[in-house]
Image: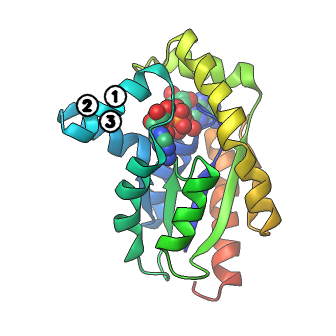
Amino acid sequence: MITILLGAPGVGKGTQAALAAESHGYTHMSTGELLRQEVAESTELGKSADTYMSRGDLVPDDIMVKMVAGRISSFPNEKVLLLDGFPRTIAQAAALEEACTSGAIGLSLYFTAPEAVLTDRLLSRGRQDDTLEVITHRLGVYAKTTEPLVKYYSDQGLLREINSDRAVDDIQADVLATVSGALNQSNIA
Ligand code: AP5
């Protein structure tokens, strides 16, 4: 079952996915992490992605779809894949549906927290793309380009909202309960 982690930069998608992966053996795929690896290894893809990432812009859809499609197409449906940071555009969402088997997307967790909380979290983390200028740009790109996916998955009955302005453990309890509920519904627990 593919579970899409949706939400603004800094909302805690990576934190929550890593915890659930560790405690429950779920697979965590972070497109941000995959891209940062490519950048660290100075691959052609990494060099091209770095220009976009350091500005806080999205890497073009064709690059992202190529990177993700092969990895998810053979993922076994009885296992849980936490997809963190993909899709981020309607075009990526359509490509994801084409790449996976019908019904494989079982859930979209939509993490929410006030913008001031997100900015504070990112500034204290201090990743290369966590300067105030780039954070502000990333939040704008998110609102314009990625937020439409909230309605997209809500219309499909897949969206579950999680208040992420709380302690990490409280959020994690909701994440695990929601994933487990979706697994039960799909009868593949
Ligand atoms: P990506 O790495 O995905 O960055 P992001 O979406 O901006 O997400 P973050 O990693 O910043 O935040 P998060 O929600 O995972 O929060 P985290 O758990 O880290 O992408 C980076 C770039 O790659 C993009 O800008 C783009 O250029 C490119 N890219 C990636 N995917 C792409 C795609 N599909 N298409 C095109 N381009 C793509 O938490 C943040 C901080 O808060 C941490 O320090 C954490 O410890 C802390 N924290 C977490 N939860 C809590 C809590 N409950 N209370 C207090 N602190 C908390």
Instruction: Give the position of the C terminus as an image quadrant.
Output: bottom right
Q: Measuring from the top left, give residue 79's x and y in whole percent.
A: 47, 77
Secondary structure under tag 2 reads helix
Question: In the image shown, does 59 or 4 lie closer to the viewer?
Answer: 59
Residue behind label 3 places its C-beta within 8 angstroms of ligand 1: yes
Mark 1 and mark 2 residues within 8 Å of each other at the beta carbon: yes
Q: Which residue does the numbered mark 3 point to in the structure image?
A: 36
Considering every residue shown, the one lying at the far bottom of the view is 187
Q: Reply above or below: 122 against 49.
A: above
Q: Which residue does the numbered mark 2 point to in the structure image?
A: 47
Q: Is residue 174 left or right of residue 5?
A: right
Q: Reply above or below: 23 against 104.
A: above
Tell me the quarter of the picture where residue 187 sits: bottom right
Q: Is residue 109 left or right of residue 47?
A: right
Q: Which residue does the numbered mark 1 point to in the structure image?
A: 50
Instruction: Give the position of the N terminus as an image quadrant.
Output: bottom right
Secondary structure under tag 1 reads helix
Q: Residue at x 49, y 81 (%)?
A: 77
Question: In the image shown, does 181 or 47 lie closer to the viewer?
Answer: 47
Mark 3 and mark 1 residues within 8 Å of each other at the beta carbon: no
Q: Residue at x 41, y 21 (%)?
A: 54
Q: Measuring from the top left, give residue 137's x and y in whole percent.
A: 60, 20
Disc 1 marks a residue whose amino acid type is Asp
